[in-house]
């Protein structure tokens, strides 16, 4: 499963990610920047739609660390 994150210091608050993936992103009322709302159904394409590259998607492997 993939995990998405937003670099709020890079985000310019254009709202594109919110418009395209409204279930996963929302704009923070105070900062005006995007934040992750849900990790449900994250796809790698999400990192391509941000004009400033603030969205990162990391593929998580199924490897589990030994104790
Ligand atoms: Fe911010 Fe990128 Fe989303 Fe635009 S697409 S609101 S710059 S994270």
Image: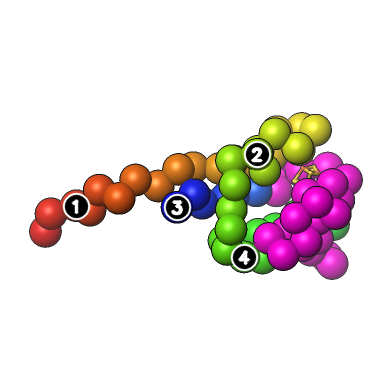
Q: Name the residue under label 3.
A: 1
Q: Which of marks 3 and 2 is nearer the N terminus?
A: 3
Q: Earlier in the sequence, mark 4 or mark 1?
A: 4
Q: Which of marks 3 and 1 is nearer the N terminus?
A: 3
Residue 33 seen from this side: no
Residue 48 seen from this side: yes
Q: Which mark is residue 38?
A: 4
Asked whether, in this view, residue 16 is left or right of residue 5, the answer is: right
Tell whether label 2 touches label 3 (CB within 8 Å).
Answer: no
Asked whether, in this view, residue 28 is left or right of residue 7, the answer is: right
Q: Mark 2 points at which residue?
A: 45
Q: Which mark is residue 65?
A: 1
Q: Is residue 4 above or below residue 10?
A: below
Quote the CA–CA distance across marks 4 and 3.
13 Å
Q: Where is residue 59 in the image (x, y as percent from the top left)?
A: 45, 43
Q: Which of marks 1 and 2 is nearer the N terminus?
A: 2
Q: In this view, does 60 lie above or below 48?
A: below
Q: Which of 44 and 58 is in front in this view?
A: 44
Tell whether label 2 touches label 1 (CB within 8 Å).
Answer: no
Q: Is residue 2 magenta?
A: no
Marks 3, 1: nearer the viewer: 3
Quote the CA–CA distance across marks 4 and 1.
25 Å
Query: Which SS type dominates the magenta stretch?
Result: loop
Q: Where is residue 40 in the image (x, y as percent from the top left)?
A: 57, 63
């Amino acid at each position: 499963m993939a995990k998405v994150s937003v670099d709020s210091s890079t985000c310019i608050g254009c709202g594109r990610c919110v418009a395209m993936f409204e279930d996963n992103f929302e704009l923070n009322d105070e900062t005006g920047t995007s934040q992750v709302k849900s990790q449900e159904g994250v796809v790698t394409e999400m990192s391509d739609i941000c004009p400033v590259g603030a969205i990162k998607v990391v593929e998580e492997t199924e490897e589990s660390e030994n104790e």
